[in-house]
Image (tube, rainbow, N blue to C red):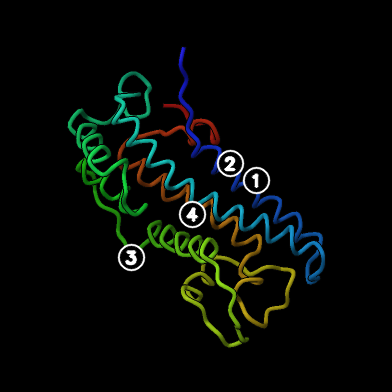
Amino acid sequence: MSSRSYMSTWMLRSSMRSADEATAIENQHVGVWGEHALPLMETVVSSVINASAFLEAMVNELYADASDQHGLTSDGYLSPLDSNTVRLMADWWNVTNEGRHNVLGKYELLLSFAGANPLDRGAEPFQSAKLLTLLRNRIVHFRPEDIGADTVVSGERALKRMFLPSQLLPDKGPWWPNRALGAGCAHWAHSSAAAFADEVSARLGLMPNYQRVIFGRRP
C-alpha cells in the first residue's frame, strides 16, 4: 500500500509556529536588544523561508498530481478540475522538466489553464506574495553591507507598509535587517503566503491539503 505526502502543509505550519515563537520572544523583551535577539532572528528567518517554500511546494504538488493522474475523482485535490485543465497541467509539468519557472508564474499559468480569472498583479494578494519572494531572496542570497540610518534597501518602502518592525529595537536606525526581521514580519509572511494560495484555490474551486489539515476545511 502506498501513501502520498504533501510537504507544503508542513512548511506552512512550521512558518506559523515560528511566528508564534517570535511573538513570545518579543513580548518578553520589548525594547531590549540582548542575547534573546539571536533566537528571535532565527525564528523569523525560518518563518519567512518556510512561507516562501510553501508557495512553491503547494503549486508543484498540484502539477505533480496532474502529471501522475492522482486525486482526480471523489474528494481528490484535483477533482473539481476538468480533464482538459488536468491535461494542460500535466503536459506543461512534463515538458518543463517539472516546472522550471518562477513561482508566482506557475499559479498564473494554472489559472490560465483552467480558464479562470487572472490575478491582478497590482493588488492583493499578488503584491504581498511578490514582496515575500523578494524578502526570501534577500535572506537566502544575503550579502553583508554597510547600511546607514538613512539607507533604503530594495523593497523597504513597500515592506514597511506590510508589517511592524521588531519590538526589540527603538524606531530609529537602519531598518534592514535587524528591525525588519521581527514577529510582525513572520506573521505577515505566513498569512500572505496562505492568502495567495487561498485566492488561487478559490478561483479554481480546489481545497488543497494544507486547507484540510491545518484549517480543518472539508470539501
Q: Residue at x 40, y 33 (%)?
A: 207
**Quadrant occupied by the C terminus:** top left
Q: CA distance from mark 3 to mark 1?
A: 30 Å
Label 4, label 2: how many angstroms apart (C-alpha)?
A: 13 Å
Give whichever of discs 4 and 2 has the lower sequence position. Answer: 2
Q: CA distance from mark 3 to mark 4?
A: 15 Å
Labels 4 and 1: the sequence-earlier one: 1
Q: Which residue is mark 4?
A: 192
Answer with mark 3 or mark 1, whichever residue precedes in sequence.
Answer: 1
Foreground label between 2 and 3:
2
Q: Nearer the viewer, mark 3 or mark 1?
A: 1
According to the picture, the residue beneath numbered tag 3 turns out to be 122
Q: Secondary structure at mark 2?
A: helix
Q: Position of residue 205 (x, y in %)?
A: 32, 35
**Location of residue 48 by image quarter:** bottom right
Does 77 sit above or below residue 16?
above
- Three-letter code, disc 3: Gly
Question: Is residue 28 found left or right of 75 in the rendered image?
Answer: right
Q: Which residue is mark 2?
A: 13
Pointer 1: what residue? 17
Circle 1: residue type: Arg
Residue at 49% across, 52% down = 52
